Image (tube, rainbow, N blue to C red):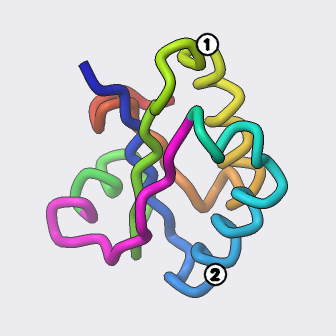
Amino acid sequence: MSVDLFCYTSLSKKEAAASIESLRKQHDALFAHNFVISSLRDANLMHKEIALEYGLVASCMFLISLNEKSAAGSMSTVSRTVKDGLGKSNVLLLLNNEIPY
């Protein structure tokens, strides 16, 4: 069973890319092996509708996938790290695209 955080952001693709790259560098222990951050992509109509249900106007999105099962206990740390890095009001995290995290 896969465990993914669907990350929707209102930041521009350029701003989000810079923030994600900074997260990868600053938190190498999390993102080098335990969690994998997907490529950033434009939010399509479905993504935008999902994010809007939670009050966020999404411009782009990415996934964070659990890569090492033993790191599952660090999901809350990853969530806090992403929210701090992108700005809490700029990002929506949904566990498996269903549950706000």
Q: Can residue 67 be seen in this view?
A: yes
Question: Which residue is under mark 1?
Answer: 73
- Looking at the picture, which amino acid does disc 1 mark? Gly
Residue 53 part of the magenta-drawn span = no
* 54 sits to left or right of 29: left
Tell which residue pokes out farthest to the right in this image.
Answer: 26
- Callout 1: 10 Å neighbours few (<14), some, many (20+)? few
- Residue 39 has which mark? none
Q: How many labels does the image show?
A: 2
Query: Which tag, 2 or 1, sits closer to the chain's start?
Result: 2
Q: Quadrant of the image for the N terminus?
A: top left
Residue 42 part of the magenta-drawn span = yes
Q: Identify which residue is drawn at 59% across, 19% down.
A: 71
Secondary-structure class at tag 1: helix
- Looking at the picture, which amino acid does disc 2 mark? Glu
Residue 86 image offset from top left, x and y in percent: 68, 61
* 64 sits to left or right of 79: left
* 76 sits to left or right of 36: right
Residue 45 image offset from top left, x and y in percent: 16, 70
- Callout 2: 10 Å neighbours few (<14), some, many (20+)? few
Residue 69 image offset from top left, x and y in percent: 47, 16
Q: Identify which residue is drawn at 38% across, 45% down.
A: 6
Whole-number angstrom distance, CA of label 2 to CA of label 1: 29 Å
Q: Foreground: 91 or 62? A: 62
Question: Which residue is under mark 2?
Answer: 15
Q: Can residue 58 be seen in this view?
A: no
Residue 66 image offset from top left, x and y in percent: 46, 31
Q: Do the residues labelled 2 and 1 touch (CB within 8 Å)?
A: no
Tell me which segment is drawn in magenta. 35-48
Q: Identify which residue is drawn at 64% across, 65% down.
A: 20
Seen in the picture, residue 76 relative to 7 is either above or below; the reply is above
